[in-house]
Image (tube, grey):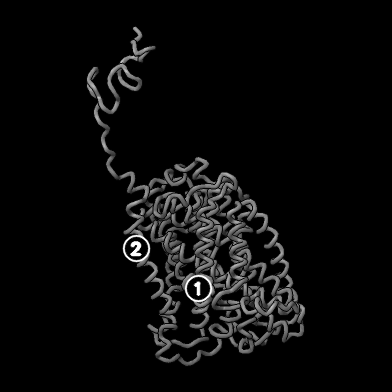
Amino acid sequence: MPPGHATDRWTGARHGLPTAYRGADLIVLGIGVMIGAGIFGLAGRQAASMAGPGVFLSFMIAGITSLLVAFCFAELASAMPTAGSAYTFAYVIFGEVWAWVVGWALILELLLAAAAVARAWSLYAAQMLADLGVNLPGAVAGMVGQSMGFDLFTLFILVILTAVVALGARVGLRTLWIIVIAKLLAIGAVIVIGALHFDRRNLAAIPVPATPGGKAEDALHSPLLGLLFGQTGAFGWFGIFAASAAITFAYIGFDVVATAAEEAEDAPRSIPKGIIRGLVITTVIYIAVAVVMVGMIPYDEIDTDAPLASAFRDAGVGFMVHVINIGAVLGLTTVILVLLVGLTRVMFSMARDGLIPRPLSKINRSYHSPTRVTLVIGFVAILLAELVDVLTLEPLVVIGALFVFIVVAGGVIRMRQTMPELPRGFRTPLSPGLPIATILACLWLMVNLQLITWLYFIIWMAFGVLVYLVYGRRNSVLATMARPVPEAPADPPPGRYDPAQGPPGRPGGPGPTAGPRGRHRR
């Protein structure tokens, strides 16, 4: 597909998105989606079970890898500023089949992430109310803060944020600014007060000695690379690298900024800045919080259910528990919000291309938003969050994202060869070396994921290929354009009767216009 066809063919009100984001808005969008699970839970779990006090190095590795990917996203987004992000990039560079594969992986990444974070939001919201001494009625208490099964808080947050996204980008943007500022204040308090209780002796054992390998029946839950080299335990340098793969979940979302390109002012320049600056700020914050956490408490004493809160309780700073809970609820709220926005834009683009039902691409005239596809996404996210144990599937989000990252990095190399004259607002430095390094880094993180994650991912992608063959290939815009147009019937000779037009001399016929009382005017 030519790049201009991807960016210019939908400019009408029915299929075009209005401008909504300025440069600062895009940075907030990135911070809003990234800062959440990584600070408020993931870091502590990985420190206690996999990386030890070296978990901040895992954040550094994942952050550097994400920055390499961000450079690649920035170049493609500056050349093709449209709502589909990696899906559209793949369409233009590799064709429809690869576009579908990438789009299907993005649906896995963003939809599952939204459902998982919504479930985590419920756990933190219930804990916040409990710590504040708020007692819910007995009938309600058993339906909130549940890791599995029906959960009222999970349903509540997904319904509310789906409505916010459906009402349009401006409403969601105002909400995002308010919540991001509030959670950054909470995180700032965590870093400052936590630094006052920092004990450098807790960082002395980096890396922690490796533990013995697991049992044979745990092979499915062991990293693929560990199985290949016979190490299925934790800690050591292997544990630090293995943790970096899981921690990539914390950075999921910087690519969502690219989905806002069609709604951004001066997108070829503002989108690259928004992606890179948001990611750099987030990486610095993540590393700072991780260092403070493992510096406050020995890694083997971390409570994996509430890592930060337990660290501050042990340090005698109990009031910070409330700050952490509030910050977690606010942080996870923005993550869900931006994930829903990003997935809406991806599926909106896929619907415009006919790969999924085209009515989903209709723009609501009142809210100037793709309301239909937003409501469908919200409904599916609710079903997924309520019926599936999504908290155990976080690595599946990671492998989907890493797969997309590899395609994007390969797209930079190919586009430099096939479309060197295409205008770009940003160029990836040291190309093709940096994109190649990006591909290798993503592959390294992928092989550090568990074997069962690979199996689930293969099943999902195989199902996606089946959906494409049954529906997408037959109904896409390219398939429609390739179909032969039936020839129009030839006009009958003048004066000869044509049953479809009526006899000459009657209204609608080829003869002269009938006058009063059927007489012909001369």
Q: Amino acid at mark 1?
A: Leu
Mark 1 Cα within 10 Å, few/some/many (few <14, many 20+)?
few
Residue at the spot x=55%, y=60% of the render?
340
**Which disc, if any, is residue 450?**
none
Q: Is residue 239 left or right of residue 406?
A: right
Which one is in front, 192 or 219? 219
Q: Is residue 382 above or below residue 365?
A: below
| Distance in Å between CA atoms under marks 2 and 1 | 24 Å
Q: Amino acid at mark 2?
A: Val
Residue for badge 2: 465
Q: Is residue 443 above or below residue 91?
A: below
Q: Are marks 2 and 1 in contact (CB under 8 Å)?
A: no
Q: Position of residue 375 (x, y in %)?
A: 53, 57
Q: Is residue 209 above or below residue 169?
A: below
Residue 500 in view of the camera: yes
Which one is in front, 391 or 314? 391
| SS under mark 2 | helix
Q: Is residue 104 left or right of residue 249?
A: left
Residue at the spot x=34%, y=7% of the render?
522
**Which disc, if any, is residue 387?**
1
